Amino acid sequence: MPEPGFRHPINRRSGPLLLALLSLLLSPLAGADATARFLAQHWQRPVPPQGAAPAHYSQLEASLDPDDCGSCHPKQRQDWGDSLHSRAMGPGLMGQLIDMPAHARDEHQSCIRCHAPLAEQADALAAEIAGAASAAGLHRRGVVCAACHVRQQHRFGPPRRDGSAPAPDQPLPHNGWQASDAFADSRFCASCHQFEPGDFALNGKLLENTYNEWLESPYAAQQITCQRCHMPDRQHRWKGIHDRDTVRAGVTLSAKLDGAPAPEVRATLTLSNSATGHRFPTYVTPQVVLEGYQAGADGEPIAGTEAYFVVARRIALDLSEEIFDTRLAPGEAATLDYNHPRAPDASTLVLRVWVQPDFFYEQFYQSLLDSGQTQRGRRDLSRALTTARGSVYTLYERRLPLN
């Protein structure tokens, strides 16, 4: 089993204390806030077992499998299948969990409370670790439809687009759904995208603090919710740092070559968090790199002319310290000031921004493999490392002629 310092860096409580803390976090007026009360009940961890379905339910109606949900909700199923929610229990996480003891359910919950929150998924994971079930269980499907929409065999969701909801006696599959405005509230997302007071923190900052970052931004006051940007038109895709177009829409970029004397090449490359409702990037896993270099007539970089500025929250792999935090709050900007002697064969200055969505995971998976501590999960971790390395993309590039 991996050493404690090499496990996934989440250690979160569960039970009544968690619910009390969550209620306090969600609203200072939780006693009078129906949404906060709904969410405190809705997001118990693990989500309690669904129990037996009503006798009149068909097998399809009672199913928790997202493919069965897709029989009647094909667009939502397709969107979900393209999202990271569907891959929340991917090889990077399973490669760690599979080497834990099957009975260590509290340790499992430190990860799957968000990555696979149903009690049925917790049971399936324990069974796979024990060798009593295959790797095709519900736990491998990640944040399934039921994780948000099913409790005690009752379906929950937002009101219709016109604000209406089904009547209690309206004959609908699985008895219709119970409508709640909580599904359009940022606090719904906070249940997994915000650590609670007392959870793991570095340098006085919670490891995951996205909801609080949003609360401190102008977007909260304007009621521009998480769903507005990450679920436009009710899409179930939740695009973020891995998607170039989403990231490009959240920032403003500019490049300028200064008229410096011939021996010097001076320029600026600026990235502004102009339309992201939280810090950019929000978590400890990605990094965004502003880069400048001179290129020859062939377009290739000239060694020794490179300059970089990294936008990230960099932490040590063993979670012992925060190395730096250069992330941008809404409205803030970062600038790479390029100032370098001109190389004799330089014809172009290249200014570009590239994104490594899984930078921390890439280093983390490699350290696990190098440590030799992983056994059953080694193949999964190798796959995850390849995926992390392949997630890098160029966000912006300008090639400025050096006259």
Image (cartoon, rainbow, N blue to C red):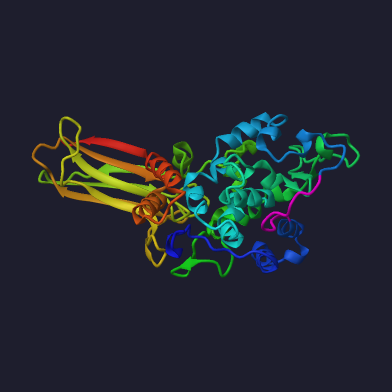
**Could you tell me residue 252's position as x and y percent?**
41, 44
**Could you tell me residue 170's position as x and y percent?**
89, 36
Q: Quadrant of residue 60?
A: top right
| Left-right relation of 283 to 303 | right
Along the line of sight, the residue nearer the viewer: 60 or 278: 60
156 relative to 215, above or below: above
Q: Quadrant of the C terminus?
A: top left
Along the line of sight, the residue nearer the viewer: 107 or 324: 107
Which residue: 46% across, 42% down? 242
Residue 44 is a magenta residue = yes
Q: Quadrant of residue 85?
A: top right
**Could you tell me residue 341's position as x and y percent?**
12, 48
Q: Quadrant of residue 20?
A: bottom right
Which residues are the magenta region? Answer: 42-52
Residue 69 is a magenta residue = no
Which residue: 60% across, 62% down? 106
Query: What predominant SS class does the magenta segment belong to?
Result: loop
